[in-house]
Image (cartoon, rainbow, N blue to C red):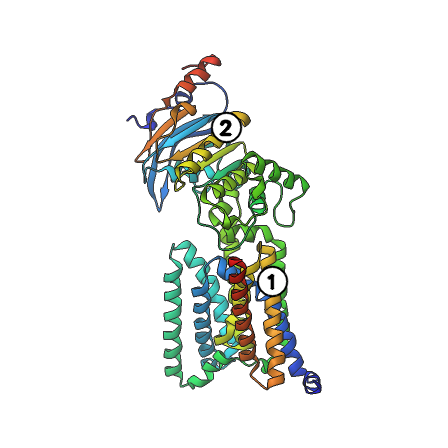
């Protein structure tokens, strides 16, 4: 325990803990959106776009994180618009962006001579490299995510439940959906920085799925999602310190355990 | 069939008084291609009107126009006595309309029956930071009772049968306290018992409340129960098919047959 206390006295470790807790308690709310709007393929696409962004960032001589963040945000806006205005199905949009991103990334790497391993660092992430600015950005994003759900709770609820009904009532469905896409893009980009592309789901998706196993409404789904997110990120962080493990992988393991346990408990409840 | 282009709305109604819906020569469609051709239709306050048409006849296009979700390609549209020209008019109109769609797949996220009914009041009494109040809860309670699902108020909508879900959808549409209830194939995909039960409730609620109702469907309607049943075929609206009930009503009121 004293080792953990000693570790927490180091600013980098403290930043990492705060970053994980903020992300776990706020970005996890987006998991409920992903499940409700069937966006699992889209979030996977955004991860691939992050790879292209990282390649572009390195090729242009700035950071892979900034490149990934910028391109993922841009792609989420474009995907929202193209899917809506051009009446393209989600799977077509996904195929277009995912394949295009991978092709673009490999072409960029081959033309500029940037070592591929540097780009693939985005896949692993490194929370211990998190700066104060990174932390502020994650906190601001967290506040925006929570504020969106507080300010437009009923509008988001209507869009998630039945967009046709929402439209007939006069809810600006396209605006709400586009905004949720942007939040999702920003959330994926932030999670890329924290835990890497391979473990984005640990923060964003899995807590939401686990929450929906028990929730009785959108409000309780969001609260439970935040709770499971904090449990996964906080639990993963301290387990990593205690057992000397990588933080991202440790958080992902805890998140997976939470989902497995919640699925089991939910199944038992249904049988009972 | 006589296309509606040659028929004025007044001749379709056959009665005096300000119509709640007045379409004149309205065409509508998608990507510049008309699906609905110069439809003229008038529905007066308190009427129960059915529109029957096969798939692709333009029923959904007509409903989308009436719901303010699709701008007519040509023609004029008046709703509740106001000419509908722009987004502001459509938003004004949507506050006065309740909508019952055909049965939907259960949602991906949980929602209680009471909460889904409450959502029908969005834009009417709450939106954004304006939260639902006690009056809204009371309206919800009343309409849950009216549709016979008060005991299901706390149940997850996803756990209900199709018939129960449609009754919840009807309660939601009515909880908006609309002047006009638009219904799109409300009984489709329901079993016979649920279909009859829902239709009976709709007819009873119309008799008791007098809400103006317009129902579109691809199946024949119980004509005697409706004020008028119109037919829509390839985007053309047929002349009114007058029923016994219309004749009786018109006669009682001294209106033209």
Are discs 1 and 2 less than 8 Å apart at CB? Answer: no
Q: Residue at x 37, y 70 (%)?
A: A100
Task: Where is residue A14? Give x, y as percent.
Answer: 67, 80
Identify the residue under disc 1.
A224
Residue B210, compared with residue A45, is above or below; it is above
Same chain for mark 1 and mark 2? The answer is no
Task: Where is residue B126? Give x, y as percent.
Answer: 62, 44
Q: Secondary structure at mark 2?
A: helix
Q: Is residue A48 visible?
A: yes
Q: Residue at x 44, y 46 (%)?
A: B104
**Which corner quadrant of the image does residue B39 belong to?**
top left
Task: Where is residue A207? Give x, y as percent.
Answer: 55, 66
Furthest-front residue in view?
Answer: A272
Q: Which of the image's four quarters has the C terminus of chain A?
A: bottom right
Q: Secondary structure at mark 1?
A: helix
Task: Where is residue A165? Give x, y as percent.
Answer: 49, 45
Q: Which of the image's four quarters has the N terminus of chain A?
A: bottom right
- The disc numbered 2 marks a residue on which chain? B
Q: Is B126 left, or right, of A56 in this rendering?
A: right
- The disc numbered 1 marks a residue on which chain? A
Task: Please rate how many residues cluster around mark 1, counting C-alpha atoms within 10 Å: few if below 14, some from 14 to 19, many from 20.
Answer: many
Identify the residue under disc 2.
B204
The numbered dot on residue B247 is none
Q: B144 or A110, which is in the foreground?
A: B144
Residue A65, compared with residue B239, is above or below; it is below
Residues under labels 1 and 2: Cα distance? Answer: 42 Å
């Amino acid at each position: 325990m004293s080792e953990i206390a000693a570790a927490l006295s180091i600013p980098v470790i403290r930043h990492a803990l705060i970053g994980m807790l903020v992300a776990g308690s706020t970005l996890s709310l987006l998991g409920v959106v992903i499940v409700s709007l069937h966006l699992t393929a889209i979030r996977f696409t955004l991860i691939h776009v992050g790879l292209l962004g990282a390649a572009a960032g390195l090729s242009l001589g700035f950071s892979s994180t900034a490149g990934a963040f910028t391109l993922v945000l841009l792609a989420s806006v474009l995907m929202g618009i193209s899917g809506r205005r051009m009446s393209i199905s989600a799977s077509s949009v996904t195929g277009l962006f995912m394949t295009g991103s991978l092709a673009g990334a490999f072409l960029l790497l081959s033309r500029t001579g940037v070592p591929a391993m540097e780009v693939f660092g985005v896949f692993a992430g490194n929370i211990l490299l998190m700066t104060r600015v990174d932390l502020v950005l994650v906190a601001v994003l967290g506040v925006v995510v929570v504020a969106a759900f507080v300010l437009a709770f009923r509008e988001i609820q209507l869009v998630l439940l039945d967009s046709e009904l929402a439209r007939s009532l006069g809810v600006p469905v396209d605006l709400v959906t586009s905004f949720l896409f942007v939040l999702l893009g920003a959330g994926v980009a932030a999670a890329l920085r924290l835990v890497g592309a391979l473990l984005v789901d640990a923060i964003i998706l899995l807590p939401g799925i686990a929450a929906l196993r028990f929730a009785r409404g959108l409000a309780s789904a969001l609260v439970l999602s935040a709770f499971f997110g904090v449990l996964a990120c906080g639990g993963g962080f301290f387990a990593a310190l205690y057992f000397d493990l990588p933080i991202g992988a440790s958080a992902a393991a805890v998140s997976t355990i939470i989902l497995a346990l919640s699925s089991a408990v939910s199944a038992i409840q249904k049988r009972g | 069939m006589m296309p509606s282009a040659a028929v004025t709305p007044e001749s379709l109604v056959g009665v005096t008084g300000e119509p709640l819906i007045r379409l004149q020569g309205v065409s509508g469609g998608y990507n510049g291609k008309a699906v609905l051709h110069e439809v003229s239709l008038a529905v007066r306050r308190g009427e129960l009107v059915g529109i029957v048409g096969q798939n692709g006849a333009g029923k959904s296009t007509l409903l989308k126009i009436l719901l303010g979700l699709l701008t007519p390609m040509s023609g004029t549209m008046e709703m509740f006595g106001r000419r509908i020209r722009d987004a502001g008019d459509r938003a004004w109109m949507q506050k006065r309309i309740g909508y019952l769609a055909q049965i939907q797949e259960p949602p991906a996220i949980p929602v209680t029956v009471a909460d889904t009914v409450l959502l029908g009041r969005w834009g009417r009494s709450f939106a954004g930071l304006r939260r639902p109040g006690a009056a809204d809860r009371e309206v919800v309670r009343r309409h849950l009772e009216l549709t016979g699902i008060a005991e299901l108020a706390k149940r997850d909508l996803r756990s209900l049968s199709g018939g129960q879900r449609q009754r919840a959808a009807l309660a939601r549409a009515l909880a908006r306290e609309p002047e006009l209830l638009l219904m799109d194939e409300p009984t489709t995909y329901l079993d016979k018992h649920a279909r009859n039960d829902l239709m009976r409730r709709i007819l009873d609620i119309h008799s008791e409340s007098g809400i103006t109702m317009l129902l579109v469907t691809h199946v024949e309607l119980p004509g005697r129960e409706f004020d008028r049943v119109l037919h829509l075929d390839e985007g053309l609206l047929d002349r009114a098919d007058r029923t016994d009930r219309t004749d009786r009503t018109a006669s009682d009121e001294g209106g033209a047959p």
